Amino acid sequence: MKRLQQAPNLAIATLWADMLTGAGIPASVQRAYASGIAGEIPPDQSLPEIWVDDAADHARARALLDEWQHLPEHRWACRGCGEIVDGPFEQCWNCGAMRPA
């Protein structure tokens, strides 16, 4: 196992670990419940961490996580309803139409 990164909270740590596992890189969350002792230990030492099971997958996992954290943002007009959609969304929130290529 090799440590990949700390996460700001348990929800994000779990999301990242699940996304990595879904991409074929077995990952787990360590120190998931250490936030309960923040104050007894330094707060930065009580954050959850994402670990990859195989150290050989570390570089690929780092690249995927970096890509997910820095998604390009787009502003586009939906062809179905004309709604302006901001952010990394691929689908219109109003009518469900997919973003044009």
Image (cartoon, grey):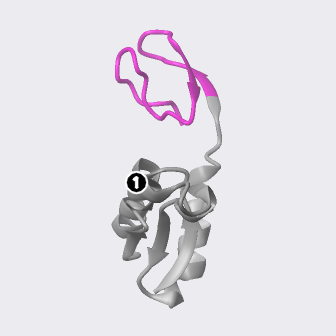
Q: Residue furthest front?
A: 40
Identify residue for label 1: 15
- Residue 48 image offset from top left, x and y in percent: 48, 61
Quadrant assignment, res 32:
bottom left
Residue 91 drawn in magenta:
yes
Rendered image quadrant of residue 54 = bottom left
Q: Residue at x 35, y 23 (%)?
A: 96
Whether 90 is drawn above or below 12: the answer is above
Membership of 89 in magenta stretch: yes
Q: Position of residue 16 (x, y in %)?
A: 45, 58
Is residue 24 depicted above or below 35 in this figure? below
Residue interval drawn in magenta: 75-101
> In which quadrant of the rendered image does the N terminus lie?
bottom left
Image-based side of 58 in relation to 52, left or right:
right
**Residue closest to the far top:** 82
Residue under the point 46% across and 58% down: 37
Mark 1 residue element:
helix
Residue type for callout 1: Leu
Question: Looking at the image, which is closer to me, 66 or 100?
Answer: 66
Q: Residue at x 43, y 23 (%)?
A: 92
Left or right of residue 10: residue 64: right
Q: Quadrant of the C terminus?
A: top right
